[in-house]
Image: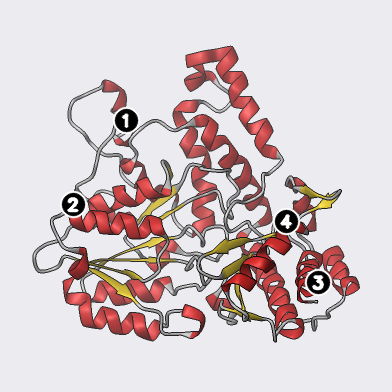
Amino acid sequence: MTAFEATRAWAEAQDAADPLRAFRDEFHIPAHAGADTLYFCGNSLGLQPKGVRAAIEAELSDWAELAVEAHFRGRLPWMHYHEYVRDAMAEVVGARPHEVVAMNSLGANLHLMMVSFYRPTAERSAILMEAGAFPTDRYALESQVRFHGFDPSRDLIELQPDGPGGTLSMTAIERAIAEHGHRVALILLPGVQYRTGQVFDLEAIVRLGHAQGCVVGFDLAHAVGNLPLALHDAGPDFAVWCTYKYLNAGPGAVAGAFVHERHARADLPRFAGWWGHDKSTRFQMGPHFSPTPGADGWQLSNPPILALAPLRASLNVFTRSGMARLVEKSRRLTAYLDWLIRTRLDDTLDIVTPDDPTQRGAQLSIRVRAGRDAGRSLFEHLERHGVIGDWREPDVIRLSPVPLYNRYADCFGAVEAIEAWVR
């Protein structure tokens, strides 16, 4: 591996030699003071692929010209539209096509999955989660516990951080599963902890949980399109994710869900809807629900075409770039930003995110040593100077160099902007 250098010339040379550099031109980069922003917020909202406008306009044209007949005679007939993103999304998450579906939002999908996979009993009623989880998860899990008549103060077990910067060790996870597994109905953890950027070992957690008889699911909001995932082989019972972060499908975009194929034909309780009915008999309009095998069987309503079109356009970029190449660039790009901060700002900033490349993705969470007020001051300074990250309470700035459109020169520019604030 080439040694890093803290010069703009070196960063620009790396960008010029980057085999993925052309993909940046496929995204709209917001402007600041006549130049491109240094956009490090793809972990919150990915940039807009330039192909999105044409994808949406094609569906608008079919609607205008064909109306209801576009369900059958459109360029991409709407009847099957959710299937047009299936193979590419399965490739991104390491699943088999029938194990994934694009539908709803992440929060709605999490509740739908828990209807099927959180089946508490008097003896096994608890949910194991991480403390400080993203609010969607915390609210959903607590409400499900209450819905089933149990007490969150007893039946919501929150793993407390025990590592540097508020991270959670695998030892702590293993110990908690061993201690509480006999009464845990569901383990629900993230692929990436949103505040710290720590990556969790999905396969190990599944193995430990299943050995104790627990159902295991994951919220992969910050992992999909970011990490090398292998959901089928890792074997969780289910997973959910959004598509507006690294998958660049737009604000509030249609989310995704995974149901392992061992449940494809299982007679699981679920909230049923017409579009989840076996498609071979769906239009017989019968009164009895017969679920489509696989993840499609959890759908409620027909797919939102204008919302799925941006996801289809973005996944086309992923298909052409390939997750393996993106992950390779991501690790080196994030390592460069990490190295610059440690080399030039070590007396000012702490990096919360683990330095082990296998325990992080395209995100570094940083804290200003002088405290929260100084952290807010730095964050606002960066915004004024066209460096776009995000702030997470109480004191974390997140910077995410996304391999599809971020550059080594962006990392160098962000550190220069931080140094200007320090001075």
Mark 4 belongs to which amino acid?
A: Tyr
Inter-mark Cα distance, 4 to 2: 43 Å
The residue labelled by disc 1 is 280
Q: Nearer the viewer, mark 4 or mark 2?
A: 2
SS under mark 3: helix
- Of marks 1 and 2, which one's residue comes earlier in the chain? 2
On the rendered structure, is 41 left or right of 192? right
Badge 2 local density, few (<14 within 10 Å), some, or many (20+)? few
Whether the residues at callouts 1 and 2 have beta carbons within 8 Å, the answer is: no
Of labels 4 and 2, earlier in sequence is 2
Residue sitting at x 57%, y 72%: 372
Measure the alpha-carbon separation of dots 1 and 4: 42 Å
Kindly state the secondary structure of the residue where label 1 is placed.
loop
- Contact, mark 4 vs mark 2 (Cβ under 8 Å): no
**Amino acid type assigned to the residue bearing label 1 in the image:** Ser
Q: Which mark is residue 405?
A: 4
The circle drawn on residue 420 is 3
Name which of mark 2 and mark 3 comes first in the sequence.
2
In the rendering, which numbered label is found on residue 147? 2
Dot 4: within a 10 Å radius of its alpha carbon, few (fewer than 14), some, or many (20 or more) residues? Answer: many
Discs 3, 4 touching: Cβ within 8 Å: no
Residue at (67, 51) in percent of width and height: 320
Amino acid type, residue under disc 2 in the picture: Phe
Element carrying mark 2: helix
Q: Is residue 324 placed above or below 320 in the rendered structure?
A: below
The secondary structure type at the circle numbered 4 is loop
Which badge, 3 or 4, is on the more N-terminal residue? 4
Can residue 362 be seen? no
Check the image and name the residue furthest to the right: 9
Residue nearest the viewer, comparing 235 with 201: 201
The figure's colour scheme reads: secondary structure
Mark in front: 2 vs 3 = 3
